[in-house]
Every structure is written in structure tokens, then in C-alpha cells.
Amino acid sequence: MTPDRGDVVYGSLGLLVLKTLDAIGPMHGYRLARRIEQISGNQLVLNQGTLYPALLRLEQMDWVSSKWGQSDTGRRVKIYSLTKAGRKQLTREEAQWQRSAGIIARFFDIAEDTP
Amino acid sequence: MSRAERELDDEVAAHLAEAIDDYIARGLSPQDARYAALRDFGGVTQVKQVHREMRGCAFMNWLDFKLGARMLVKYPGLTLVGGIAMAFAICVGLVVFQILGLFVHPTLPLPQGDRLVEIRLMDLEVNDEEPQILHDYLHWRQSLRSITDVGAWRNSSLNLIDALGDSRPVAVAEMSVAGFKVSAGVPLMGRVLVEADEQPAAPAVAVIGHEIWRTRFGSDPNVIGRSVKFGNEDVTIVGVMREGYEFPVSHDVWMPLKTALLDQTPRSGPVVVAFGLLATGASMKTAQAELTTVGRQVAAQSPATHQRLEPLVRPFAMMTSPAGDPAGGLILYSVYVFTAALLVLVCGNVGLLLFARAASREADLVVRTALGASRGRIVAQMFAEALVLGGLAAVVGVIAADVALRYWGVGFLEANMGRLPFWFDLNLSPTAFAVAMLLTTAAAVVAGIMPAMKITRRMGDRLKQTTAGSGGLRFGGVWTVVIVAQVAATVIFPAVVYLMQFMRSGIEDFDAGFATEQYLAVQLERDYAVFGENTDAAALERNARLAGTLDELRRQVASQPGVAGVTFIGNVPTTGGPQKIVEMAYDLDLPQAHGAEPPFREATIGAVDPSYFEVLNAPVLAGRGFTAADAASGSRVAIVDQGFVDQILQGRNAVGQQVRFRYPGKAPRPWSAGNAADPPGLGDWYEIVGVVPELGLGAPTRKGRAAGLYIPATPNLFVQIQMMVHVPGGDPMTIAPQVREAAAAVDPSLRLVSLQRVNEVNNDVLWVTSLWVRITVVLSSVALLLSLAGIYAVLSFTVARRTREIGVRVALGASRRRVIAATFRRPLLQVTGGILVGTMIVFTAAILIRNTELAGFENELTLAGMAKIVGYGAIMLGVCMLACLVPTRRALGVEPTTALRTE
């Protein structure tokens, strides 16, 4: 599968952000975008700008918090981190996602002998 | 730039810089690195825009208004219908506010206007005002502390005769000197009245108003000191007031109130109105408290006259307000309720239209929600759209209200009230503009926020439903009520127009029974005893003199060329004479239960000069006409008209029958041709000596046919004197100048209050009725247009929403008829419900109206009338069904597979 821009459905970008912040810890916007791309094995190429409305929404939902800090290169950047509520939300969404994915997967596993 | 905006800029810049560094580290040239970073980021501007929109969710920004304006252009039909509706609502609201404001919270354009009060005396026994307060006024003037500068005035009307001999009545206020002080009256020339003028022996002086000075004296700069004739009296002009001064109400001339000459015993004397200024530190409440105390003291001193009298204080300008009496208050209240109901209905309708439009944009709204727009954001946007529409409508509405008030408001009020008080200002006030803005906002709230709230409810759920392929929006119960109310309104308004038109044609077509266009009606008034004493002997003497004057006037007018005859009557035909209860002699012969009331018979009385029927060329159908001897006092004869014969005598032979007046009730007020000695209770028997045709003794505004009873008398004894001049060949108005001249020559104090053709005496009523017809036509047209547009939009919307459902039904094999029935059921029920509600209201109102004074309306509630309403209802139903038909046809024509794919 070749990398395809805009492949990320908007609804799932939030989930990806939450999971990345949960796994790797606080980071700034560019680092976050790169991480998501790297974790996907560069299969997923973000329109990196779309990350910012998504981050704003997560902040408005109180799932993510932000504060100004410094990047590795010494630039003044906004650092995002997961909140307690965000962690809970992540658990919920993760479970739901696993369930949906499981159902879909069962369909792809259909064989002649499936009852 | 806001802080959030700056932070976003910084963040984006940092992001790009980090990316560029990354790419350079990976071996790209700075320029290529920059290009790659920008490509990865996507549109910087768009990202910022979305971010901005998401941040500013709770409030509106100018983009919303821009979008609103674009929507107006995109949907011209809705803009037109909705705009007209809102403009109409704002216009009606403003006009009502402005006119009712004159009565409910009038303001005096005087420096101390807010402190100026009127002091009245209420008779608690009859719950009415006691007009003879001169005695009390003098007492208040001496004793009151919380009200200063207490004064009074007395209305009178006098003939002002100028140097050319032109004699016309002017409105005179015999006013205390205090009046000029409290109203800050400054003369243009000369002086105002002073206390010395009020002395009994002081020479007669007058101050004239600017308008009189201009029109009657040609703005003569040397008018001061001139002696002019007011009636029979020579009066010296001592001052000219400035333009616009009409205090106390709408007066042209001011003369001193010589209270010393007037009767001052309690509850007697002339009618005066008392006024004063609230003292510094006093409020209405404290002034009323003091007045109540004073009233109790007087009641204790003179219980015979003042036991049930209570002095009351109220703001001066409230004297024209009907709010004081319960019936008037109720009318004002009902006008407010009616207007409010109209506004809600209109705005509800516009709301309906906006809702239908918003629903057609549902997909767009759902996408916006998905992109992060909050509910408040969408509601704010729809509110902004309604506000843009409302703003445009407000401009149109304000202009329309201004035009309406300018052209018809003054005429309407004058037709109802006569000359308007000086504080009646119909120009739109700043408050009115504030009200317009308030109304606009309110309209936008009803028309914008209500549907927005409805449409954005559970947007998240609908996100799923829409993608699943079915429209989630439904019109709920509130909208059903709105539709039903709309349809009901479309039934009610035409019925009102019909009724108004019916009244109008009733007045226009009223048959007086003689050639009214050939007669001139001249209303004559005797002078009040302004300068002389008011004793019975003097009154009798004046009455004798008046008889001579009228005789002479009749002779002089009759001798003019073109005049065929001159006669007198108490009330001009077609204006409605006084109605009195009569009793027939044969009633007494009827076997009656003990104490039973005799049959109720009401006749319309015409006090006429014996020459009346002759001058009207009216044939005597039976018996004889009046002779000069019949007018002599003590003669008890009467002539009845055919209406009397048919309705009261029920076809009996009239000549020779005996009739008398009956005065029921506690306080008998005998009918009188001027003779105050008429006994209360039962009157004398009158013998009917003749029958004449119906000669318009009733009025077109009265219910049914009049039963006319003519009593002969000499005109000097009439309560009101109308001289009728017959000019057979040509316009009777051409004789008016000669009549004026003759009257001035015979007696300068004889006032010609009005001169008009007899066929035009009802023009005032006709004008007001025509105005009402026009108003109701405009109202109804707008209501109809709106309702039809609203109903069409909603019905076609609801049907269009079901396209997919219809497709599925057809695909599943449902017959077309079943599908149509299922689709039409709900709209059909709503429209039928509306028609039923409207018809019920019309019939209820018709039954109520039937019992009031509406000529001939009882004949209109026939099968034909009902058929008209039913027919109209059918047309309405047809139009509404048409609204459903178009989208249903479209839906039925759609291939099931296509239907399933759409949405």
C-alpha cells in the first residue's frame, strides 16, 4: 500500500493522538505528527496541519492539556500531554475499537465451514 | 490580534521550523526543505481558519452576518416572504406602540410636564367623575401644600368675528392665571393674563393663539390693544402666544376665569377642570394622601353633597387615557394581546420557513458538526441569518410605520377624538426606534434561534442516521400548532375583511328616504353664558331671544336664491336620533300578570320643526302633517314613520293611537325638547296624527330598522339645533357663505359649528371604516401570503423528507394510492384542523357581533354565508394539498433504486 494523503479518518486521528501521548509521553505538535507517521511505518502520511484543530478539540474536551516549553532544538514550542480524563477516554475508545475491529476481522475470516 | 491567534502563529511557525531543520538534516537544500515542510503541513491558512472557527464557538462574528446576507440572495423567495412578514410585524408593532403610548404613558412637551397633574373628583356612588368641582377647586387652591399653582379652566366655544365680519367659532379656555405659569407660556407679543384680569370689574381681555393670529388677523403686528367681538361681547386682545402653544388641551384663545361671578355652592356651577404642579419633594403618592385627607374633611363638613366624593390626582396628560376606566383598560390590553399574538404568529411563520430551509441544509450542518462546530456555533449562525433578514425588515418596517402614522394616524385619531391635544405627537420617538430594535431582535430570536435549537438537537445521533441514509429531522408538536394557527388565521382574516366591507357598504348604501344631496345641514349652537349670570330667568329670556333669532335666520336663508325651504331638526337624518322606550295605550289593555313589565318598545325620536316634512317633500301616508299650532307648548301630537307602524304597531292603524315615553331606572332622565320641566317617570300621552315614510331617523351604524317618532317643537327648545336648507338645483354647499353671513347679521353669537351636505354627514365614520377595511385587507393579504408560503414550505419539506420512504414502499409493492394516503394524512389533518379552528372562531365572533349594534348583520349568518366560508375553506385545503402534491409526484416518479441511493 502506498502512502496516501488524507487517509486518516478524522474521527480516528484523535484516538491516534491520545494513544501516542499515552505511549511516549508529552511532546510538541511536530514531534507528535512525525511519531504517528513513524509508528504507522510511514504507511500513514498526515496533513500535519490537521493535527492542530484535532489537538484543540481534545483540549476543549479536557483530554489533553498543553503548556509552553522548549524543543530539543531550543525552540519555544507548545507541549501536549495526556490528562487523567484523556486516559480514561482512551481506555474506552480502545475497547470499542478492538471490538469493532474484531467484528470486521471475523467477516474477513469467513470460510466455507464457518457455521 | 488576539492572544490565541498569536500563539497559534507561533506554534505553526515552530512546527515549520522544526520540519525544515529535519529535512535539512536529511540532506535537502534549505529551499527544498522549506517546500517539503509546507507540503507536509497542508494549507496553513485553512488550518488557522478552522482553528479560529473552533475557538470562537459561543459568539457571532462578522462572517456569520456575511453568510446571512449571502443566504438572503441565495433564497430570494424566502427573503421576500420572510422579509415582508417581519417588516409587517415590526410596522404593526411600532404603530400600535406609538398610538397606545399616547394614552398609556403620554408625556407633556413642557419644562415641568412630569410634575403637572390634574385633580378630579370621583363620585363613588356612580363610579364616575363629578364634573361640577368649582367649589372644591377653590378649596384645593387654598389648602393644598403638596400641589402648588392650582388652577382651573373651563372650555367654551365662541364666535370670533373679525373686521371683515367673518364669524367662526374658536376654542376658548377660560383659564386661571396659573395656567400660563405651569405651562411656561410665553407670549410672542403683548402679555399673558394676570390676576387683575380675573377681578369681576376688570375689562374683558383675551390672549390669542399663534394660529388664530396668523389666519384670522393676517399676522397683524398691531393686533395688541385691538377690540374684537367674541360673540356679542367686545374683548380687547392683550397678547399673542407663541406658535404651538395650545395649553391646556387644544385651545386657540384664553380668557380669564372669573370665578367670582360663577356659582360656588357645592356640586353646582359650570364644569371646570383643575390642575396644579407637584410641589418640590412631593410625589403623586404624597399628593394623593393629602388630597384624600382634604376630601375627608370636606365630606365631614358637607355630608349632603360630599359623602361619596373623593378627590383624585393623576398626571395631567392622562386625562385622555381610557386606562382609568376598566372598559378602556380592557381595550388597551386586548390591543396589546392582539399585537403580541400577531407578532408571535408572524415570527413563528418566518421561523417555520427558516427551519424548512435549515432542514434542507441538514447535510451541511452535520458536516460542520463533524468538523468540530459546536451547537452554540450553529445556533449563533442561524440567529445571525435571521438578524440580517430582520435588520432589512426593520428598515422597511420603520419607514412603513412612519408613513402610516403620518398619513393615517392623525386622521384616524382626529376622526375618533376631534381635535388632538397638544401633546399628541405621532412622530417616531427615540423610544420607538429602541422598540423597533427590540422587536427585530425578538423576531430574530423566534425566527432564528427556535428553529436552530430544534435542528441542532441530538446532532451527533443524526450524524450516524444521515450516513445510514435516513433524514432524522421531524416537525414536532410546536410546529403543528404553528401550522394550525396559520391556517386558522387565513380563515379569520378574510372573514374580518368581509365584515368590514359589509359595514362600509352598509353606511354607503344607507337609504335616507329623501334626496340628501340636495340638503345642507347647519349645526347651530347657542352661546354659553360666558359673561352673563346663569339663572333660570336669564335662561328663559335668552331662549325667547333665540326663538326670534332662529325665525329671522330662517327667513333670511329662505329668501336666498336657489333655496326651496328651511327647516330644523334635533339630529341630522342618518346620524341616529336619541332612542327612548315608549308605551302604547293599548298595551295597558292587554291582560298582564301583576307587576309584569309592559312590552319593551324602543323608538327613535326626532324633534322637528312643524315645517320639516314639507321641506323634505315627504308625502304624508296617512292622517295629516304637522301645523304651526302643533309646536305650541301643551300640544301633545306626534307623527310616526312606516318603521314605527311595521315594528311597534305591527300594522295597526296608526292615526289616533296614544303613545307615551317611559323612563325606567332609578334616575329618570326625561326626554325633552328643551323643556326642563318634563316630569320623570311616565310622560304625557301623545296622539299619533299622521304617518310618513322612513326618512333616515336611524343610523347606518345601528342595528336594524328605526321606529321613528316625530315630536313637533320650535327649534329654540331643541337640545341640539340642526338647520336643514333645501337647495334643489345644484350643490347645497354653494349656499354656505350666504348662510354664514345671514347668521352673523342676525346674531353674532350664533355659532355655526358645522356646515355639510346631508349625504356627507357620515363621512367621518365612513373614513374610519374605510381605513379599517384597508388595514384589514393589508393584514389579511400579508397573513395569507405568509401562511401559504409557510404551509407550502413545510408540507413540501415533510413530503420531500419522505422520498426515500416512498421509494422503499413502492419497491416493496405498495400501491400508489396507499402511498399517497399515507403521505397526505398528517398535512391533511393539520390543515383541516386549522380550518376548523378558524371557522369556529369566526362563527363565535359572528354570534357575539350579532348581539351588538351592527346593522343587518343578523341576515348575513345565513346558509349563503356559511357556504362562503366552507367554500373558502375548500380553496385553502386545495392550495395546501397542492403544496404536498408536487413533492409527492416527484417522489413517486423516482425509481426505487434511485430513491434508496439518494440521501
Image: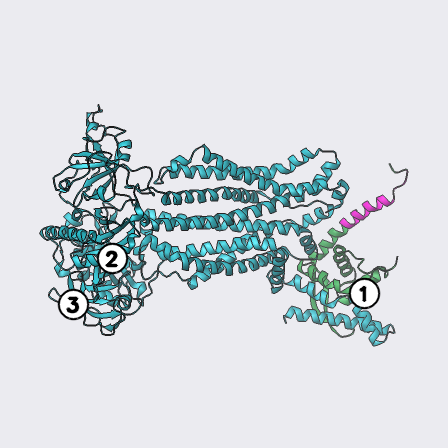
Chain colours: A green, B cyan
Q: Judge whether B251 appears above or below B484 on screen.
A: below
What residue is shown with label 1? A34
Q: Secondary structure at mark 1?
A: helix
Q: Judge whether B585 appears above or below B282 on screen.
A: above
* Drawn side of residue B21 relative to residue B360, left or right: right
What residue is shown with label 2? B119
Query: Tag 1, which chain?
Result: A
- Total tally of numbered discs in the picture: 3
Q: Judge whether B348 appears above or below B218 on screen.
A: above
Which label sits in the foreground, 3 or 2? 3
Report the residue at 17% width, 62% height from top: B142
Tags 3 and 1 both on a single chain: no
The magenta region covers A96-112
Is residue B341 at least partly visible in the picture?
no
Q: Of B814 and A89, which appears nearest the observer?
A: B814
Q: Is residue B855 magenta?
A: no
Which mark is drawn over residue B325?
none
**Disc 1 residue crowd, few under 14, some 14–19, many 20+, Cα 10 Å:** some
Query: Tag 2, which chain?
Result: B
Specify the farthest residue to the left. B537
Q: Main secondary structure of the magenta part?
A: helix
Cα separation between marks 1 and 2: 88 Å
Cα separation between marks 3 and 1: 103 Å
Report the residue at 76% width, 70% height from top: B15
